[in-house]
Amino acid sequence: MSVIAIVGMPGSGKTTVGRHLAKRLNLRFVDSDHEIERELGCSIKQYFELEGEQAFRDVEQRVIASLCQYPPHEGFDGTVLATGGGAVLRAENRRELRAGAWVVYLRSHPAELAKRLRFDKSRPLLQGGNAAKRLQDLFDQRDAYYKETAHFTADTGRPSVHMLVNTIAMQYEMRGLTQ
């Protein structure tokens, strides 16, 4: 399998863990949010404000479908794909990710996320109001979707990034998914 996709709540460490995992496994790293912003020509926050969540999810769906089909690139055996926190909301994305990638769910508890994200102003769904409650609501809404999509779940509560990367890499290798 040439794509490892990482799903999870906003702030769960998808980008950080993804970058380190890609380096460890000699895979290319791609962040779906960066690819979406490149396609849109503006930030996700700006697009959300102008066009709304539904229009954003349409673009996200196209980008994820494309990224799950990524062929290996020169010098790399595959891709580690960090998805946006809401990528699993659409059934089409869940199916595409599950079929086209080995999916890792970085499971983080809302109270932990609230501490990490308390000063983050870039996430549109966490703006305005009680961010801790909003994170709990998002977790309640999305946890089952993350589990449905994932081939493997890693709890982010205690382990360091290095330990998470090692755990994920071992699971990937034990399943014989390396090239």
Image (cartoon, grey):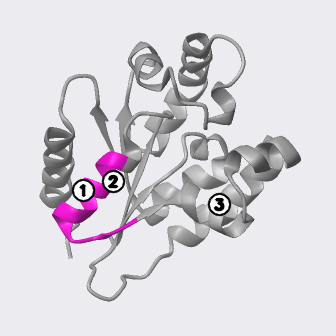
> Which quadrant: the N terminus?
bottom left
- The reply to whether the C-beta atoms of the residues labelled 3 and 1 are less than 8 Å apart is no
Residue 123, disc: none
- What type is the residue that disc 3 sits on? Glu
Q: Residues within 10 Å of mark 2 (few under 14, many from 20)?
A: many
- The reply to whether the C-beta atoms of the residues labelled 2 and 1 are less than 8 Å apart is yes
What residue is at 73 percent from the left and 64 percent from the top?
Answer: 40
Q: For numbered disc 3, what is the local secondary structure? A: helix
Q: Residues within 10 Å of mark 1 (few under 14, many from 20)?
A: many
The vertical placement of 21 against 89, above or below, is below
In the rendered structure, the answer to whether residue 160 lies left or right of residue 156 reads left
In the rendered structure, the answer to whether residue 155 lies left or right of residue 167 reads right
Residue extending farthest bottom: 74
Residue 21, disc: 1
Q: Nearer the viewer, residue 151 or 86?
A: 86
Residue 171 % position (x, y): 18, 50
Task: Say which residue label 3 marks.
Answer: 37
- What type is the residue that disc 1 sits on? Leu
Query: Is any part of residue 109 visible from this angle?
Result: yes
Magenta region: 16-29
Task: Say which residue label 2 marks.
Answer: 18
Q: Is residue 27 magenta?
A: yes
